[in-house]
Amino acid sequence: MFRRRKRAEAEIPSASMADIAFELMIFFLVATTFDVDTGIGLVLPPAAETTEQVKVKQSDIAKLLVNAAGEVLLDGELITVQQIRELIKNKIKANPKLIVSIKTDRETNYSRYIEVLDELKLAYNDLREEYSLKTFGKSYKDLTRDQQEEVKKEIPIRISIAEPEEVK
Amino acid sequence: MKFQKKFGQTKPRVPTASLPDIIFMMLLFFMVTTTIKVFDVKVRYILPEAAAIEKIENKRLISYIWVGKDGRIQIDDNIVQLDDIIDIMYRKRQENPNVIVSLRIDRDSKMGIVIDIQQRLRKADALRINYSTLQKL
């Protein structure tokens, strides 16, 4: 008579497991910030004391001066920021060994400096684009990695930061 | 009567038993790939804008220097003095010779402080730098 009633097997309901996992995943998706660092890359020259001075011909240097008022002088001539791109491009075409030397005043605005640097980079990018269209018949961004390296080697970015006069 | 259908008695169902496992695997992927390395930025800054910008491919190489509106300098989680930069960056370079220093400098800063920082980076031999900028549209 007192037969034990057969119990149903204990089970954790797992139907909502997927929902829980989904919720966790949504949290991570939202919380993840893929903040990719973007900017203008540059390589500084080594410290002045450690390296010997390399002599460069005056004709191979384009001097770009940004003064305290934000005015840009290219080899002593006053130009606008928008002009830099074309002028530098022509100069590099005329002399592929050209080094662009940037010098700023201590009072120059940082954003103005970035603008100038940006124009320079744009000029180099244009040249690389032209080169890759000419040799590979494709846009620079459509090239393979090796080809891009080749273009980079062919048109290196030669931007030099001039030795500042006074340092705190 | 003889040719009764064998199948079709039970409703066809997509097995959902392994669904949680799939989701968990995706979850694990996200957890592993997420690099939670948030710095407590103590300076206020607005980055300048530029058009010809590039992405830094390897995030692990980057070390940041912030310069705020008020000219304070922050490295990692500390506000530092100008002359501390040499030691700090030198140590960083020993740990990681290919370090890229990302300069997050306020757009209204003067070049004076930028030049000073760059001179110290040169002394510390941390030569690869990157001026952090926003994309100009």
Image (spheres, coloured by chain):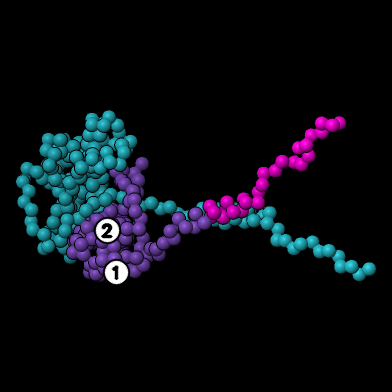
Q: Which of the image's four quarters has the C terminus of chain B?
A: top left
Q: Residue at x 17, y 39 (%)?
A: A88
Q: Position of residue A28 (x, y in %)?
A: 52, 56
Magenta residues, dominant SS class = loop
Q: Which mark is residue B70?
A: none
Q: Where is mark 1, residue-wise?
A: B80
Crowding near pointer 2: few (<14 within 10 Å), some, many (20+)?
Answer: some
| Chain to which mark 2 belongs | B
Q: Amino acid at mark 2?
A: Asn
Which image quadrant for residue B69? bottom left
| Chain to which mark 1 belongs | B
Q: Where is mark 2, residue-wise?
A: B98
Q: Is residue B42 visible?
A: yes
Distance between mark 1 and mark 2 Cα atoms: 22 Å
Q: Nearer the viewer, residue B38 or A137?
A: A137
User: Same subunit under labels 1 and 2?
Assistant: yes
Q: Position of residue B13 (x, y in %)?
A: 70, 43
Chain colored purple = B
Q: Nearer the viewer, residue B112 or B3?
A: B3
Q: Which residues are magenta?
A: B1-27
Whichever of labels 1 and 2 marks the residue nearer the N terminus, that label is 1
Q: Amino acid at mark 1?
A: Val
Identity of the residue furthest to the front in this view? B2
Chain colored cyan = A
